[in-house]
Image: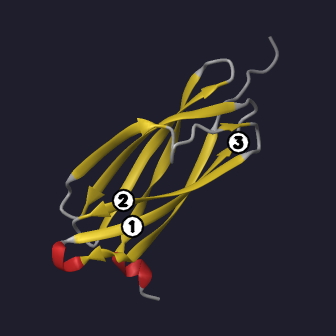
């Protein structure tokens, strides 16, 4: 059979606090996050859907599921990357997000790409 084809997407995230979109008096804290997805496997694959867990400082978890990312379902060849920016709103000045992307190879094999947990913190804007 030879070696198995290897399907893998690697994800990294860069968060930032959105001062202008936030209203601390109303307990609204907005954060942007830029996600970079790299096809680090050996086969072409498509990002089909997403599953996020958003946890605020009180431990409240919001679950978000959906098709695609920012209206796209990008098909990535080995070595290709896709980058997008989205945003989240918390009721606390900090929290965290983690999740996974649901992906499918061009041979219609499903796999998941984990999104490592990252911190959302208002203090990120104070340099």
Residue 64 position, x and y percent, is 34, 43
Instruction: Report the residue marked by disc 2.
Output: 88
Q: Residue at x 23, y 69 (%)?
A: 92
Instruction: Report the residue marked by disc 3.
Output: 40
Residue 124 position, x and y percent, is 42, 78
Disc 3 and disc 1 in contact, CB within 8 angstroms: no
Quarter holding the N terminus is top right
Left or right for 56, reference 1: left
Earlier-in-chain disc, 3 versus 2:
3
* Colour pattern: secondary structure
Structural crowding at the residue carrying mark 1, measured as other residues with C-alpha within 10 Å and reported as few (<14), some (14–19) or many (≥20):
many
The tally of labels here is: 3
- Towards the viewer: 53 or 64: 64
Left or right for 49, reference 30: right
Instruction: Report the residue marked by disc 1.
Output: 31
The part of the image, by quadrant, that contains residue 55 is bottom left
Earlier-in-chain disc, 2 versus 1:
1
Secondary structure of residue under mark 2:
strand
Q: Is residue 93 above or below residue 85?
A: below
């Amino acid at each position: 059979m030879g070696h198995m084809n290897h399907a893998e997407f690697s994800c990294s995230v860069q968060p930032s606090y959105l001062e202008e979109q936030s209203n601390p008096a109303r307990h609204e804290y907005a954060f942007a996050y830029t996600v970079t997805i790299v096809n680090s496997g050996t086969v072409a694959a498509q990002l089909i859907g997403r599953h996020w867990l958003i946890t605020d400082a009180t431990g409240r978890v919001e679950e978000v599921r959906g098709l695609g990312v920012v209206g796209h379902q990008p098909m990535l060849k080995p070595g290709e990357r896709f980058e997008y920016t989205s945003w989240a709103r918390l009721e606390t000045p900090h929290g965290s997000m983690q999740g996974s992307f649901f992906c499918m190879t061009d041979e219609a094999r499903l796999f998941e790409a984990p999104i490592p947990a990252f911190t959302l913190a208002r203090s990120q804007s104070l340099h």
